[in-house]
Amino acid sequence: MKLADLVKKIDFLLVQGNLDVEISDIFYDSRKCTNHSVFVCLKGYEADGHKFINSAVDKGAVALVVSDKVQVKKDVTVIRVKNTREALAFMSAEFFGNPALQLKTVAITGTKGKTTVSCMIRTVLQKAGIKTGLIGTLGVIIDDEVTKTINTTPESYEIQRFLRKMVDSGCECAVMEASSQGLKWHRMDGFVFDYGVFTNLSVDHIGGNEHKDMQEYLECKSLLFKKCKVGIVNIDDKNYRKILKNHTCSIETYGFSHDADIVAFNEKLISKSCYIGIHFETKGKINLNIDVDIPGKFSIYNALAALSVCRHFKLPKAAIIKGLNEVKVKGRIESVPVPGNFTLLIDYAHNALSMKNILTTLREYRPNRLITLFGAGGNRPKIRRYEMGEVSGRLSDLSVVTADNSRDEDVMDIISDIEVGLRKTRGKFIVIPDRKEAIRYCISIAKDNDIIVLAGKGHEDYQEINGKRIHFDEREVVTDILKELSEVR
């Protein structure tokens, strides 16, 4: 493409060169530049692309997009913009032919629930025959192909590349998680979403390289509702009005409040072998009776968010009901089939708050015993380990302490820290450092109506030990253990 075509939707100053230059690709990593490419200088917390313009030119870049003054040889075109991240988003959309215009696009933002809601929407639409791609924590999912990504919301170039792949694969819809960082860094610029969803807001991602305070965190979340056509929000969240400040979209609401456009009521717990879920009904813009195979009241909110989107696709009510009942979200209170009358769950809970939430929720189902297997991450604050130990000790009938991602630390040192918290409670616990053996132990002692939670790994399929990632998928581990136990019997 001509550079002029790539930059036609952004404000810029042509510093030198001309816009008639042919561009083969766009890069924001100077090491990847190729002949006839354009290099966009991004500024981050750790690196500034402006420092690498000579490297980019040496590798073949014929144009630079900058926000600072730079000096480079005269045969290189330089254009200056106010924000290079925003420019990258719009340029990438043009480069890939504006694929979002050929899709129905949905973005979900919020502190909790983004992954679950996105999976729910995709499951419902897929089962109704609407091919849907997904971008988020679980990676990029198109058909049965999963491409892992570093960030929940990838860089804008990657988003546009994946949207193009979705279109070329026959997708009609794209669903993605909109992280606060993704919104803050303009990764989702370059197009307008058809639907934007807000789940909830709580204290998270404050400090360090993320957000300086809660106000900035909230403001970043709110950006979604300036870049979507229809905003769908949880009216029960106390921050929902702040999230909608200066919004430019039409608004729909969901929740238990009678003021919501879709109201949930008559909620009931469902508990049976290998199925711990919740039932509820809705009224308002759509009337349904729904069962969800994921426990907890928060599952109702997630399902409400999903059906609030899916109803716009004019699906049969039966398709929505069936999809929500069958949805499985990898690593999010994920039920794993086991023989016997007990329940085995895999969940990503890896800090005290998330553990408290899931264990409190599961307590409501009155299990015979609640057994929690968990470890803690190495190279992380020790206080997290104390807190996790104390939470599990207070809420579990038995804590099985084991390895997680110990990274560069000795796993026994991490376990000793967890024990500090456990000993502040009267909770029973056992230490089994090898995670596979710990899982084997939990399965071997399972009794009728027990609930076993394998906490911490969730969707991850590895353990990080001594700087190396070793393949470790708990679903595979459980399958192997069940096979070994059946052979012994």
Image (spheres, rainbow, N blue to C red):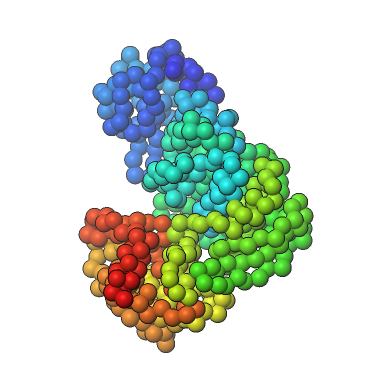
Residue at x 27% of width, y 70% of height: 434
- As drawn, is 292 to the left or to the right of 380? right
Residue 253: x, y in percent?
70, 52
Residue 285: x, y in percent?
76, 51
Pick the residue in front: 54 or 96.
Answer: 96
Q: How many marks?
A: 0
Pick the residue in front: 52 or 419.
Answer: 419
Residue 447: x, y in percent?
44, 81
Residue at x 25% of width, y 60% of height: 465
Q: Quadrant of the N terminus?
A: top left
Residue 279: x, y in percent?
65, 66
Residue 462: name its quadrant.
Answer: bottom left
> Among all residues in the image, which is located at the extreme bottom?
426
Q: Quadrant of the C terminus?
A: bottom left
Q: Is residue 377 visible?
A: no
Pick the residue in front: 123 or 331.
Answer: 123
- As drawn, is 281 to the left or to the right of 37? right
Residue 30: name its quadrant.
Answer: top left
Tell me: residue 300, above or below residue 142: below
Pick the residue in front: 11 or 431.
Answer: 431
Tell me: residue 368, above or below residue 243: below
Tell me: residue 42, above or below residue 211: above
Residue at x 22% of width, y 59% of height: 466
Residue at x 67% of width, y 52% of height: 318
Q: Is residue 291 visible?
A: yes
